[in-house]
Amino acid sequence: MSESQKTLSRRGFLKGTGAAAGALGLAGLAGVGTAGSLLSPVDAHAESEERTAHLCHQFHCLTGCNLKCTIRDERISIIEPSDIVKDKKHSTICLRGIGEVSHIYSQDRLQVPMKRVGERGEGKFEQISWDEAIKTIADNLKETQQKYGEGSVFIRKSTEAGIDFDFITQLLHADAGGQWGLDRGQANGLGPAFGPWSYLSNRSHWEFKDAATIIELSHNPLESAMVWSRPLMDAKEAGVYIVAIDPRFTGTAAKANEWLPVRPGTDAALIQGMLKAVVDNGWYDEEFIMAHTSCPYLVDRATGKSFRSSETMAPNPAVVSAEPVGAPFVWDTVTNAPALYDDPAVVAALEGEWTVDGKQLVTEFTLIKEWLDGITLEWAAETSGIDKQAIVNLADRYANNGPAIIDIGLGGADKYTNADVLGHSTAMLVALTGQYGKKGAGYASYCGLGASNPSATLNYWTLPEEYGYGESPVAMYDMPYKENSIHAALTFGDAFTLEAGAAQDMLNWVKTLDFFAIVDLYHSSAVDYADIVLPACTKFECEENVKQLRDSMGHVMLANGMVKPLFESKSDLQIERLLAAQWGLEDLLPKTYEELARFMLDGVADADPRMEGITYDALLANGGVMALPETGDDYMPDGTADFFLTPSTRIELYYEYLADQGHALPVYEDANEAFETNPKKAQYPLYFTQGKSRYRIHAYYSAAEWFQEDFGPSINIAPEDAEVRGISTGDDVRVFNDRGSFVATALINRSLQPGVLFMAETTYTRYYKEGFLQNVTNSARLERGYSMFFGPQIPYNDVLVEVEKA
Amino acid sequence: MTKYGMAINKTRCIGCQTCAYACKMQNSVAKNVRWNRVLSEGCDVVDGAVGQYPNLSRTYLPLACQHCENPACMKVCPTGATYKDEMGRVEIDYEKCIGCRMCMAACPYNARSFNWEEPVHEPGFAYGDKDVPERTKGVAEKCTMCKERTDRGEEPRCVQCCPMGARVFGDLDDPNSEVSKVIATRHASQLLEEQGTHPQVYYFE
Ligand code: SF4
Ligand code: SF4
C-alpha cells in the first residue's frame, strides 16, 4: 500500500512501498545525462532569487487555467492558481497543473535529438545533433515527395501543439490525416438536429443550480475536469436532482442522487425507453415542438424523402451534405394543403397523413410515433439493464418537473459504433420535451468550451495563398486498412498509438513507412518506432521570455517569464522554423513567439471594440493576463431555441440523408462488439472500457513521477469477476482478445458493474510489463459514419476481452 | 488569541487529490511521503466503493494532521519537539526530534510520516516554498497547517488550490470568521471525537 493510500487505521503505518513504475531512463541511449544528473539537488534555497511566470496551462482539458509559477534558481518550484485573473471564479488549478513541477522535470523527458539504431519498435537510439536530425527529416520528406508526390507525406500536430499554429504541414502541402475519429460519436448523431457545433452548450454551466434535474449522460466531469465541475457541486448543494448514466460507478455517479448503471454501449436503449414513455404518456411540449422543431414537416412515405419546395430554399445551407435544400412543407389545416413551414398564416398539423398528387405525405411526428410503437419499455429495460420503472420515472422527472439539463461527455458512449444513434435519440428527447434554450435547461457537453466564458478576437497568422493542407483522402486511423499514398510521416506528439485503436495494425503499418520522425516531449509509445526523434520543450520553457498567446476563460493570456528549454529541447516554433529553413521558407513564419503574439493582437480593437486596450505591451505590463470586458460573475449568455445551424434553422429530427441506410429515425442497433448477445462473449466474456482519469489528459502526465507513486497502468475488475479467475489486487494480469494482449496490474474495485473492466486511457508502453491497452481495442468502422460531420469514430470501448493471471 | 483551524465540506469534496499534491509541492514533501492524503472511505483501493452492486456509495476523506487542541502526539513526545504554537498549530521542531516515533504511535489519525532514510526528491531539487525547512533522515514530519504561508497571512496551500472550494480556513477563536460560522451553521463534526483530542480540523456535509 503506498503512502497516499495509508488509511486512518494502523494498517500501512510504516513506510510505503516504492513507486509502481519507477524511472526507467532512456532505454538503449548511452552517454546521455538523465534528468537526475542534470538536475542535481540544490539546497539552502532560502537565499535564492525568485521570480514569477504566468501562462495559460492546458487547452486539452478544455479548461485553460491561468497559472502562476514561482521560479527559483531557474527551476519551476511552485505552481499555483493565477493571482491576476479578474475574479476568484477564474483563479483555478487542478492536480495536473500542480503536478507539472514533477512532470516538467520527469526522467522520461526526451532530452536530445536521436536517430534509431535498432529495429523499429526496439527503442534503440543514438544521440545526434540538431543539424543532422533536421537535415535527415528534410531530406527524407523531400525525397518521398519527389518520388511519390506531395500527398505522400503525412504530418500531424497533437491537439495541444496544433492550436497555436501548424505551419509545416501547410508549407509542404502534406496530408494532415483527415478526420480524427475521437469522441464525437454523439455529436455526429445530434449535429443534424441541432447543428454541427451544438455539442457545446449555448448557455453557461454556472446555470446548473437553476435546473431541477441534471442528467450526466456518459459524462464524468468530477474526474476528468475538476475545475469546471464546480457548478455541478453548486447545483448539488442547491438541491438539484442529479442522475448519472454510466456503466461504472464514477466519481460523478458517487455524487449523484441516482446512478443508472447501463450496460456498455446501450445508453441509446435507455434514452429510447424515455422517449417511449414521454410520447405514450403525452409528456411532450407541443408548443415547443411546433415552434422550434421539424415535427410537423412532411415526408413522402414511399421514398422516405422530405417533401420540400423546389422554388424556395431553406434559409440555411444544409450542414450535412453542404448542399442547399428546398424549404420544407407542412400541412396547413386552414387550407388543407401543403404550405411552407415558416408561412405565418399557416396553422400546421402535428400529426396526420394526406395524399397529394399520388404521394402519401405524413408528418415527421407521425413517423416518430409509428417508430416508437415498435419499441417497448421491456426491450429498453432488457437491453440497457435498467429497470423499466426507473426509465419511466426518469422520463417523468425529466419532462415534467421543471427545467432539466442533459450534460453529455465527450468520450465514454462516443467510443461505440452506435454512438450516433444515442446522439440522435437524445436530440429527439430534448426536442420533444422542450428542455432547451431557457434558464436551467439545455443539452450539450457543458465543458470549459462553449458559452461559459466570452471569447476574444485575435488575428490568425496565415501563409501565402499557395500554401495549404494537401488532400486527406484516407483518415489516419484508416491508413492501415485502406489503400493510401503515405510513405513518410512526421508527427508532433504520439498520433499513431493515441489516435487509433488496434495498435498492432497501426504499428505494423508504421513499420512499412519509408520514414517516420516524431517531435515529442516524453518517451511516448510511438517514439520507439521513429527513425528520428526531436525533443520539444514544455509550454513552461522557451528560448524567449514569452510564449503562447491564448484566449481562455474570458481572458487573453500571454505566457511570459518562461524558463530556458531544458536539456537540448526546443520550442515548437523554433522546430518548425528549422524545418521550414530546409525548404528556404522560414521567412513565412514568425521569427519569435513575440512576433506572433504582437501580430495576433495588432489592430484587433478596430474590428472588435471589446479588445480595446488589450495590446502586447499592456498584456506584459499586466503579468500577461487581461480580462475581456464581459468576464465576471454575471456573464450568463442567453442561448435560445430560436436559431439552429440546420437548413430550416429549427431542430430537425428526421435525417433524410440516412433514409437509404434505414436511419432517418434513430433506429437502435447494437454496438459493433460490445453487446450481450454477441456470440464472441463465449470466448471473451468481459467488456473492456477505458476513460479519462484525473491523473492524465489522455496519455499526458503519465511521465510525472508524483502521479506514478499512486497511479500506473492498472485494470479495475469487479470482485466477482476477479474471484472466478483467482485474481487478487496487485496481481499482474493479461488482458487479451483476437487483436492482441497486454499485461497490467489488477485492482479489484467494487465500483464496477460485474462483467465490465475499466482502465484509465492509454499511457506509454514503457510503463507496462508487456504491450499496452491499445493492443486490444477495436478498429471497426461504422459505414454510415463516412457521411457524417465528424466521420466514423474510433470505437475504443466497443471491445470484448478475457483476463487471466499473467 | 488566534487558533487556526479548518473545515472541510465533504459534500463538495470530489476526491480529486489536488490538495494532496498541492501539499506535496508546497512543503517539498519527498518521494513516497504524503502529509495530506485523500482517502476513499471504507475502500481498499482509491476510488473504490462500499456496498453491493448496484447499491454503491463512495465518500472521500481528505486527511492530514488535525492540529488537535489536546494533541496525543505532543503528550508523548519526550523532547518537546512536538509543540502547540501560538497560532494554535501543532508543529515539530526538527532539531529536537530524536526519531523515537512515540508521536506516530500516539496519533489516532495516522497523520505522521517518518524518514527512515534520507528523503529522496523527485524532481531532484528543493521544490516548494523557500521558507519551508528541510527534513532529514530520522525525523518525523506532518502537515504544519502551512506554517510558512499562514505566518505570511496566506491560507494553506490545500485551501488555495482546492478546485471545489471545499476547504475553509480561519481563526476558530474569532466567532465571525468564515470557518467558525461554517462550523456553527453546518453542524461540523470532528474525527474520532471520543479520543478527546479535540481536532481543530472539522468536517461537514
Ligand atoms: S490541467 Fe488542470 S490546471 Fe491545467 S488547465 Fe486543465 S484544469 Fe487547469
Ligand atoms: S482538493 Fe478539494 S475536492 Fe479535491 S480532494 Fe482535496 S478537498 Fe477534496
Image: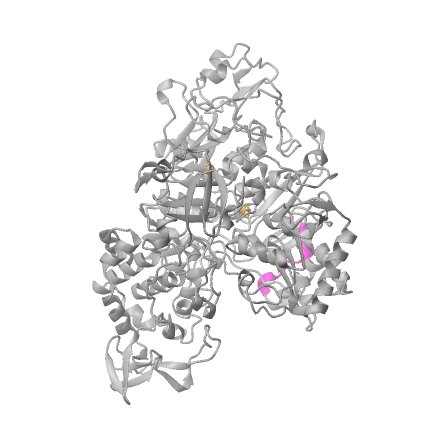
Secondary structure predominantly adopted by residues drawn in magenta: helix
Image location of residue A658, percent across then percent down: 39, 72
Answer yes or no: is residue A38 visible: yes
Q: Is residue B99 left or right of residue A10?
A: right
On whether residue A235 falls in the magenta region, the answer is no
The residue nearer to you, when weighing A519 against A686, is: A686
Q: Start and end of the magenta stretch?
A: A609-623
Answer yes or no: is residue B176 visible: no
Q: Is residue A324 left or right of residue B128?
A: left
The residue nearer to you, when weighing A533 against A549, is: A533
Image location of residue A162, percent across then percent down: 61, 58
Q: In the rendered view, would you say A358 is above or below A754? A: below
The residue nearer to you, when weighing A778 against A196, is: A778
Q: Residue at x 53, y 60 (%)?
A: A477
Q: In the rendered view, would you say B59 is above or below A341? A: above
**Residue, far left:** A281
Q: Residue at x 30, y 85 (%)?
A: A338
**Residue, far top:** B78
On whether residue A619 falls in the magenta region, the answer is yes
In the figure, residue A313 lies in which quadrant? bottom left
Q: In the rendered view, would you say A542 is above or below A745? A: below
**Residue, far bottom:** A357
In the figure, residue B63 lies in which quadrant? top left
Image location of residue A550, percent across then percent down: 60, 55
